[in-house]
Amino acid sequence: MFLARLPMTMNGVLMTLYIVTGLGRGYGAAGLVGAGITLGMAVGAPLLGRCLDRYGLRPVVAVCGIGTTVFWAAAPHLPYAALAAVAVPAGMLSVPAGSLARQVLAALVPPQERRAAYSLDTISIEATFMIGPAAGIAAITAFSPTWTLTALGVLFGGTAFLIWLVNPPLREEVAEPEPPGARPPLRSWLTGRLVATLLIAAGALFVLVGTELATLAALRSNGDLQVTGLVIAVMCAASILGGIVHGAVRRSLPQGVLMLLLALLVVPVGLADRPWWLLMLVLIPTNLVCAPTLAATTETVSRIAPPQVRGEAMGLQDASTRLGLALGGPVVGFAIDHSSPAWGFAAAGLGGLVLAAAGLLRRRTPAPEPVPALAER
């Protein structure tokens, strides 16, 4: 799953550079294609999750792997209008590596050990973001855009084939097969508590993408763009450290509290945005709770959703995080454009708090009783 996520961290920067430098378009045009891919991922995630629940891993991964490979191999040969037109369906056919990883962990790891497993998974995600974008920029700088985008498509296809070949389990083993119609109805598991968890997840990603955007804007405003890589690396390292601690302790803070800390700690960062090393230091506290917040979200979803619909529930989690990403960029960007990078940090934290508050209000609904496995009935 680490290998499968690696090209996903490259595709945004590669598509942007290709459209801006290869096609001679602006960043707005590149952002439109990127937004289309993100929208497609958000719409497709629950649908692919439902297909995983119904048909299993191999058919879904095969279709998505072929579709994604064809898109990225064809992308450097398409005009801009065609790229924009196929962005949404291409996003819908993205291999759901994140959802698959979480389902496999839920199937293979006992409930009492899942906090550590999900923390390790989140640490793996941070590692891909430390490697992927830099590797993608290096590749498209050293080679032609056509070669780089085609190679990205081959990488997507190759990792999809590896997942298909290994075919890891998506559900715990049960003594008896599930009878037809065993899938619980949507209203029985998509409760207020699960909706609250998804809203908090959207708020967390709103904060994260907004913080990254405000950090880049602050460094650019102060003439310190040359240290961007170092600052982002320290942010990722802080998140990894927080994930290690979260996974190692017996009891950790709940998702809602972690989310509040994530948002509140970023609001005042803009008061210390220069020099660059001070900005880097004040970003460490909020990033320490980044990986724990994401891991706690996955742990909560896996605990609430019945195993029969875990794929769809994890797909909804992916969709909610995409929603947070889609909202965070424009909102924080608007705040920066009309004020300063310092207000971008405040907008990131306050916007995340609004989404988290909506989720915490939904949590007043009583939590549903977990659905027992068929073998235990």
Image (cartoon, grey):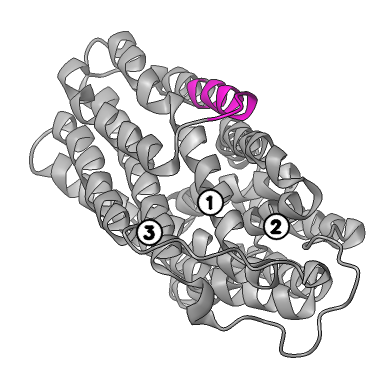
Q: Residue 154 at what x, y percent from top left?
A: 77, 57
Q: Is residue 247 above or below residue 283?
A: below
Q: Residue 225 at what x, y percent from top left?
A: 34, 22
First in residue order: circle 2 vs circle 3: 2
Number of numbered tags placed on the structure image? 3
Q: Is residue 212 above or below residue 235?
A: below
Q: Residues within 10 Å of mark 2 (few under 14, many from 20)?
A: many
Q: Amino acid at mark 3?
A: Ala
What's the mark number on residue 103?
2
Question: Could you tell me how far apart the alpha carbons at marks 2 and 3 are, in whole angstroms?
Answer: 20 Å
Q: Amino acid at mark 1?
A: Thr
| Quarter-of-image position of residue 280 | top left
Q: Nearer the viewer, residue 306 or 246?
A: 306
Q: Which residue is mark 3?
A: 196
Residue at image position (74%, 44%) is: 3
Element at label 3: helix
* Magenta region includes residue 240: yes
Q: Which range of residues does the magenta coloring cover? A: 238-251
Q: Nearer the viewer, residue 302 or 32?
A: 302
Q: Residue 330 at what x, y percent from top left?
A: 25, 53
Q: Is residue 365 left or right of residue 162?
A: left
Residue at image position (19%, 25%) is: 268
What's the mark number on residue 300?
1
Q: Residue 145 at what x, y percent from top left?
A: 60, 51
> Which image quarter is the C terminus in?
bottom right
